[in-house]
Image (tube, rainbow, N blue to C red):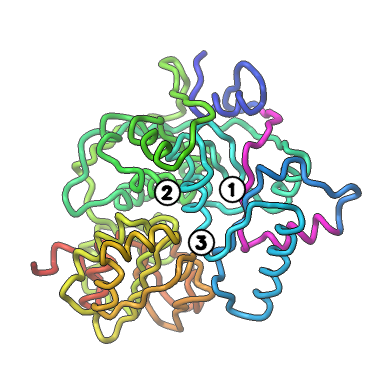
Amino acid sequence: MGMTIAEKIIALAAGVGEAHAGEIHTVEVDRLMSNDGTTHLTIDMYNTQLKDPHIADVSKLVWIVDHNVPCDSPKTAASHRKMRDFAREHGITYYEGEGVCHQIMMENHVRPGELIFGADSHTCAYGALGAFGTGVGCTDYLYAMVTGTSWVMVPETLRFYLKGKLPDGVYARDLILTIIGRKGANGANYKAMEFVGEGMKTLTMSDRIAICNLCVEAGAKTALMEVDDIAMEYLTAHGREPKAVFKSDPDAHFEEEYEIDLSEITPIVAKPHFVDNVVSAKECVGTKIDEAFLGSCNNGRIEDLRVGADIIRGRKVHPLVRFLVVPASRSIYEEALKEGIIQTFIDAGAIVMNPNCSVCWGSCQGVIGEGETLISTGTRNFKGRAGHADSYVYLASAATVTASAITGEITTADMIQP
């Protein structure tokens, strides 16, 4: 029997000829990413729970401070210092103030064919470059950090064949929210979601990252895309070569296969308090908002900022709305400066922040209060995700978020007069 992309990557990492769904393999992990959400816990366990504390291969570790930047409290400052000092002591690759962990990984580290553990659930974003990225807890992270290995149960694969092209004014975020809505929050539990088809040629790397990044919201173990010319051009531009390039075999087994016509996708909103609570954006038009957020590892890239800037140029943020714009990395921020995008947002009255998780994480910037409503390009809209437990988060594309920031209520971009 042939193998899927997920099965081939696991077989390579396990040093075996074949791997198939349901099997459990011991694997060598290619890369280990951790951020300031839980790294302090990993360090505490390393220092107190191990008889022989050591790092198997420090070159595989990447630590990124992104969730609370700059610090929001003395407690956070102590946590960051612990992470900073440990990284310096052990020679761990370390980023602080450079941006969101997954964007940094895509820009600087991820290679096709790698098996990557990240101490963050949206590590599945790395599938946009044909890598098996999956989120783990700090205990599993510590084991892999100390031994260089772990175990993985090979997931079944759900295959999504994309055809056609997204209509003007419709974005990759609308596509993946549509898929999550159809599958449900548990519809892909411990599955690999694989994306192929002619429609892939119409999707940029930014689109692909956005799609893979949110697959965990359907419960996926990982997300994967075939590595094509678009992916290779991105990789080359960032100075890297693939570890391995895989495609699923013609006789590989897929648990389910779906065909999606991109031309039929429309603007989508995920209503509170679940990512799979999706409806047509038109159904939410008129909902009053207090805050809008354009950023995150899902929609904070230069392409998203361009979309927002084109809509808000020459206009103003609604006087009763706070509009936070947060580039996903320093390099994106710099590009936005060069293109005049940052100035466009500032002229409109937006609040432009340093690269970090910001409102998506909801602990250090733009926290919303009781009864307030946020429309966001962040990754989640769970109850209390962005602040008070009795607040409301709607998820939408960069276009819908920006249009809503202008009108003060949920608005689709096509409703904004030229």
* Residue under numbered circle 2: 184
- The question of residue 35 being in magenta is answered with yes
Q: Are marks 1 and 3 in contact (CB under 8 Å)?
A: no
The relative height of residue 113 versus residue 402 in the rendered view (above or below) is above
Judge by depth and name the residue closer to the eye, 263 or 342.
342
Kind of element beneath mark 3: loop
Indicate the amino acid at tag 3: Glu
Q: CA distance from mark 2 to mark 1?
A: 19 Å
Measuring from the top left, give residue 136's x and y in whole percent.
63, 48
Residue at horizontal 31%, vertical 77%? 350
User: To which quarter of the image does residue 276 belong?
Assistant: bottom left
Q: Earlier in the sequence, mark 1 or mark 3?
A: 3
Q: Is label 3 or label 2 in front?
A: 3
Q: Earlier in the sequence, mark 2 or mark 1?
A: 1
Indicate the amino acid at tag 1: Gly
Judge by depth and name the residue closer to the eye, 260 or 418.
418
Residue at horizontal 59%, vertical 40%? 116
State the quadrant of the C terminus.
bottom left
